[in-house]
Image (cartoon, rainbow, N blue to C red):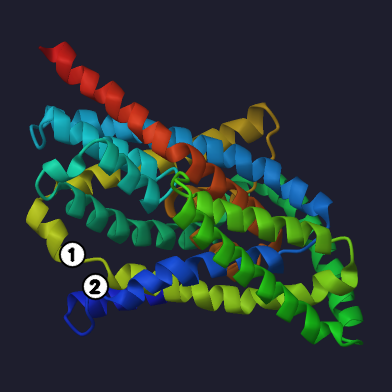
Amino acid sequence: MIAFSACLALANAGVIPTAAPAYELATSAALPASVGLALLSSAQPSASIGRALVPTAQAFGLVSVGTTIGALAAFSLVVACGMLPVAQAACAAGCLCATYVGGTANLLAVAAATDARSHVALLPSLLAADAALMGCHFALLAWASKLRPLMRLFAAGELDAKEATGRLEEQKTTSTMRAERGPLQLVVPSVGAAIAATACAGASWLERVSPVPSGSALAFICLVCAATAAAASRREEIAGPLQSLALPAELLSCIFLGSLGAGTDLRALRAAGPSAALMCVVVLSMHTILGLGGAILANRFVRARITLPALLTASNAAVGGSSTATAMALAFGWGELVAPAAACGTIGYSIATALGAVSYTHLRAHETDSY
């Protein structure tokens, strides 16, 4: 958050540029490397990963439903208020539905499919509002993680999570102590970094030579690094040293988030008017309220066992994608949620474009019906 906010402020004050090749490099190199290293650092017993994956996936489904309903509500609001014509509002709703289930790549894919560039200033304003309010949402998640009333609401699930985390920390300490006794402490992280670099290079090559869908390259990195972490989890002397890759993963995440903040030109948001910002606020509000309410009801009536960390991680995965979700899980000490965060982010990348396009088609039909 410091990296994002500081670079956002510096760029819009004219101290650093809002567009530079380094920012593109951060997205194409720092982002995938961060995700790969974070997944490798999450090596732990598969039972712990499975225990955290189910509630996180359930929470991801709930917040995705909230996002979709929010996009429909935002469309209805701006059309009813006369802020945007139906065609533009439908395009904006489809793009926001895609980005808050998957990521910016999905937003751009839906924008291309719906010819968003034909609507003057719509796409720049959506991108600016998305980036600015995404940072606010991340700050809200960080605040909510320490909010005592919320912690009490999720107390039953948290007890299970704390017990699992306690066992996990004990296992990590044991594996780290064993690894420190031999040369593996240096060799294993180096091999892990090489695997992450190879996966990134392979994903980049795959993206160049084949017409893969948006998010497929990052999904390939997630698959390779998650499989490697799962295999390493069977050997304590290997899993322990891999956890040292968490620090470079966090640093690369900061570089990516800093470039994201620096690339946000708030003038585009001001020039396009308040409609894009209002739609983002409505979508994110519905995402948060329905996700939170759904998780509480699911825990109470169907014994879902969704923990507060799982809900916050799932929300981050939907709004920011795998990179920011894994970074948050690492920074908050939720090691068991790193792999689920990447998995939910990958699922979001794979379904968000289709979901946004379907939403756009459905909402455009409203224009035809009105005639």
The residue lying furthest to the front in this view is 209
Q: Find residue 173 and report its horizontal and vertical position in percent.
A: 84, 75
Q: Is residue 155 left or right of residue 319?
A: right
Q: Vertical placement of 61 versus 52: above or below? A: above
Report the quarter where the C terminus lies: top left
Which residue bears the numbered disc 1? 266
Q: Is residue 265 left or right of residue 24?
A: left
The disc placed on residue 19 is: 2
Q: Is residue 162 left or right of residue 249?
A: right
Question: How many numbered marks, from 0 up?
Answer: 2
The disc placed on residue 152 is: none
Q: Find residue 34 and report its horizontal and vertical position in percent.
A: 55, 69
Q: Please tell me which residue lies in front, 18 or 302.
A: 18
Q: Identify residue type, mark 1.
A: Leu
- Identify which residue is drawn at 64% across, 47% down: 307
Quick one: label 1 or label 2, which is nearer the N terminus?
Answer: 2
Report the quarter where the N terminus lies: bottom left
Element carrying mark 1: helix
The image quarter containing residue 43 is bottom right
The image quarter containing residue 100 is top left
Q: Vertical placement of 50 versus 62: above or below? A: below
- Identify which residue is drawn at 30% across, 22% down: 362
